[in-house]
Image (cartoon, rainbow, N blue to C red):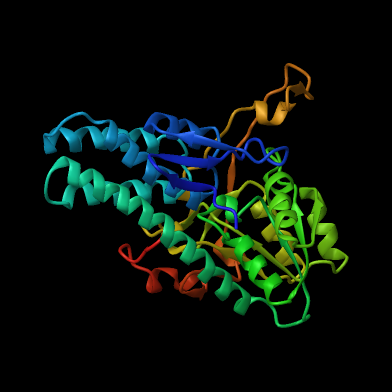
Amino acid sequence: MLYPVVWRDDRVALIDQTRLPRELTQVEIRRSDDMAMAIKTMIVRGAPAIGIAAAYGMYLGAREINTRDRTAFLERLEAIGQMLRETRPTAVNLFWAIERMLKVARTTPGTVEQVRQTLLETAQRINAEDLETCQAIGKHGLESLPQQPEKLRLLTHCNAGALATAGYGTALGVVRSAYLAGRLERLYADETRPRLQGAKLTTWECIYDGIPVTVITDNMAAHCMQQGMIDAVVVGADRIAANGDTANKIGTYSLALVARAHNIPFFVAAPKSTVDLSLHDGSQIPIEERDAAEIYQIGETRVVPKGAEFYNPAFDVTPADLITAIITEQGAIAPAELRSQLTPSSPKSS
């Protein structure tokens, strides 16, 4: 299995996702500011994986603080947390993991060194919990998929696989579970413009694991549904509001609309920690806008004439009424039931 974030000796090893699918390489991170840069530049990406990386980043930062005074230590740790928060504004798992690490630091008795050791153990626990969560999501997702046909043709968007989590994946975890149960005929993977995470990462994962996959461009999804080629859609999420509105990679909203038009079930797969109960609805979810270069050039080649203006939101929000169910580690939940079934203290994974 692929593990994108691994604690190794005294450092964090990250699969460099910016180099996939050309080559599988790792980047070793020893400092908190390097972890912040790795998150910002998408060496590590995917909401759960970002949360795990941030947790390790908090420990690395704690290790850099040269003081035995608890008060001074906690103040500087708070500043490191703020630096990491500023890397990616939409993925709530980032903020959840940082706050969990800060809470552990505040409440752990003993010396600064004892606090540091507890922070490392907490980051490792967040990592392990997320893997268990993804496997549970895969199990519940398999149970939620349509019973007919026996062999399903699923469509996904972006990458919500092992590379986006501790391993196994959320949306792609559901796909993996279907494949292992003999219920998957084929996965259709949206290319996912402009960064092509579907074409580069989801497809690479599927080939790595032997899962049958077909790549389509984002604007082919409606045609494929019209032709009867898709039985269900499964996507991940970066933040889910209390009413079930879901922020995911740009293009997810349009996919939900065409799925509804063709009466195809649309599932969101995400850990409970992705649900932000402090937000009433999706209009309150901050949407990251990324560099225009992602649109106007491919690699180092500019493909758009100079003089054009650009708009590059990284995410869009799918309204809850377009979502069939949100698949979490505790099962499939109707969007309208999120608030009643989840509480702020319930998340156990990153």
- Counting from the top left corner in percent of width and height, residue 58 is at 33, 40
- Counting from the top left corner in percent of width and height, residue 277 is at 38, 60
Q: Left or right: where does residue 163 sit relative to residue 117?
A: right
Q: Is residue 204 visible?
A: yes
Residue ID at (44%, 69%)? 338
Q: Quadrant of residue 75?
A: top left
Q: Nearer the viewer, residue 190 or 48?
A: 48
Q: Left or right: where does residue 215 sit relative to residue 20?
A: right
Q: Quadrant of residue 223?
A: bottom right
Q: Nearer the viewer, residue 40 or 92?
A: 40
Q: Left or right: where does residue 126 sit relative to residue 110?
A: right
Residue ID at (68%, 24%)? 309
Residue ID at (38%, 69%)? 342
- Counting from the top left corner in percent of width and height, residue 195 is at 68, 38
- Counting from the top left corner in percent of width and height, residue 53 is at 44, 44
Q: Left or right: where does residue 322 sit relative to residue 95?
A: right
Q: Is residue 350 visible?
A: no
